[in-house]
Image: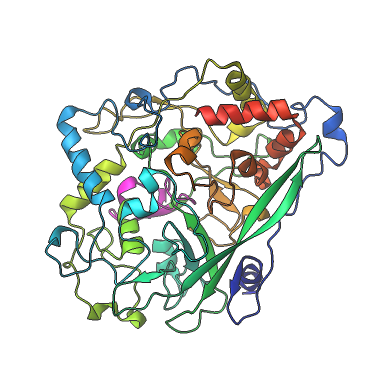
Amino acid sequence: MASAMAFKCNNLRLTGQGCSADHREKTTMNMLRSGLLALMLPLASSSLAQTDYPIQTNPKSGGEGSVAQSDHNAYSLPQANLAMSERLNFSVGNSFFRNPWVIAPASTDARDGLGPLFNTNSCQGCHIKDGRGHPHEPGEPPVSIFLRLAVLGDPDENAEAIRQHGFIPAPVYGTQLQTAAIPGMEPEADLLLEWKEREEKLADGTVVKLREPVFTIENPRYGPLPEGLLTSPRVAPPMIGLGLLEAIPEEDILAAEDPDDRDGNGISGRANRVWDKATKTSGVLGRFGLKAAEPNVMQQSMGAFAGDMGLTSTLAPHTDCTPEQGCERFPNGGDIEVSDKIANFVGFYASSLAVPERRDMDDMDVQKGAKLFNEAGCAACHTPRYVTGQVNGRPDLSGQEIWPYTDLLLHDMGPGLADNRPEFIANGQEWRTAPLWGVGLAQLINPRAGFLHDSRARTLEEAILWHGGEAQAAKEVYRALDAQQRATLIRFLESL
């Protein structure tokens, strides 16, 4: 319980409970201050430095399904190799993903049943143009960012909750804070966001300002917030290439696990093991979500319908509304509000969004940046290349050489990025390696988008400088680079 209270005061300010403090990253390495790194060749000091990571030479990051479009709609296109006979299914799924759901009862009974508690009324409301969400500004509702909730407790007494959720949901308030409600129902609470800034000084004297979010839960409307509340801010990630990530053979992902760091490179990635709702099986490989807590695209999608919009489905027959909140007094959109047919359309759409092709690959700075990325050790977690397996009925996803730049494993990212909230086997400092394909277009798709799990990083450079834990050595290499070298590495990332 003490650790829960420490987290609460470090990361969350709760109205009336006197908690207001910054959570600062404690540097675990002191390479620059010792002068060692500055005296050596910039890349030689990293234990991760290698030259055998592959360099992408084909612009088709998403295999033959990659699309050449690179404008504000670049994330919203179907796989280029998707059969024409499947394009209608993609379009139908898109309509249910994009258009708002409404309060029941309604004449549009195929998409009614919103709420009573929810965060947004459409999938697109979080995934802006199928891309990243963004933090809210003062006076705005928090639409594409929310807080996951949990509490600590006796594992034996809460074994079933932990087995299915990976954590213990908060009493009364459930698994996430819902800041919107239909008429006649009160939102769970208000979520305020402020920013704290600090400076990061690089080896050449350049100063970069970093910002850290401070969330405040105000006006809880269903009783006091539970003691020892754990929270985790989440901003919606991009939707591209999900079907391809699901098609990576499990053995290829597990081959990169090294929980005991036997190779001594400072990287100890491990796979999350989660609950599969369809098969009611524990210990299934997690791939999706910021902590790899979902095993497949369908479960991730139906979980979002239930948690974010208050809509039930066969896979998620219960929303996040708890008995104490009394949602059952309102009309619903049917015993199952997202029918199996609609669920299949949405799942197909989510697994069929294409990855944009890389750009500017012939640019010399981009090529130099790609080598720096590998030599700095970034590719030790952001694994460049895979070949997908065979997917029944989906030749567009099968046997594709892809370049997602992720290992889909959990890594300790240090205290600076910690949420101190467990999720299945993921601890409070672990996050899944984010795929980097398409990242160079993120702020063209949504100009307000940021990076990392809570969008604290306004630039790719800020995102790098927030890395700690297993990524600390690679970050220190970046800090030691001169301005031109840093610019070439960023140019590489912008080409993805």
**161 left or right of 4 in image:** left
Q: Which residue: 33% across, 80% down?
A: 323
The magenta segment is 274-300
Q: Is residue 338 magenta?
A: no
**116 left or right of 252 in image:** left
Q: Farthest front residue?
A: 139
Q: Farthest bottom residue?
A: 223
User: Residue 22's quadrant in the figure?
Assistant: bottom right
Q: Position of residue 426 (x, y in %)?
A: 53, 54
Classify 204 as above or below 133.
Answer: above
Q: Is residue 372 visible?
A: yes
Q: Position of residue 87 (x, y in %)?
A: 19, 34
Q: Which residue: 61% across, 43% down?
A: 463
Classify 81 as above or below 214.
Answer: above
**309 left or right of 401 in image:** left
User: Residue 131's quadrant in the figure?
Assistant: top left
Q: Is residue 277 magenta?
A: yes
Q: Position of residue 11 (x, y in %)?
A: 62, 65
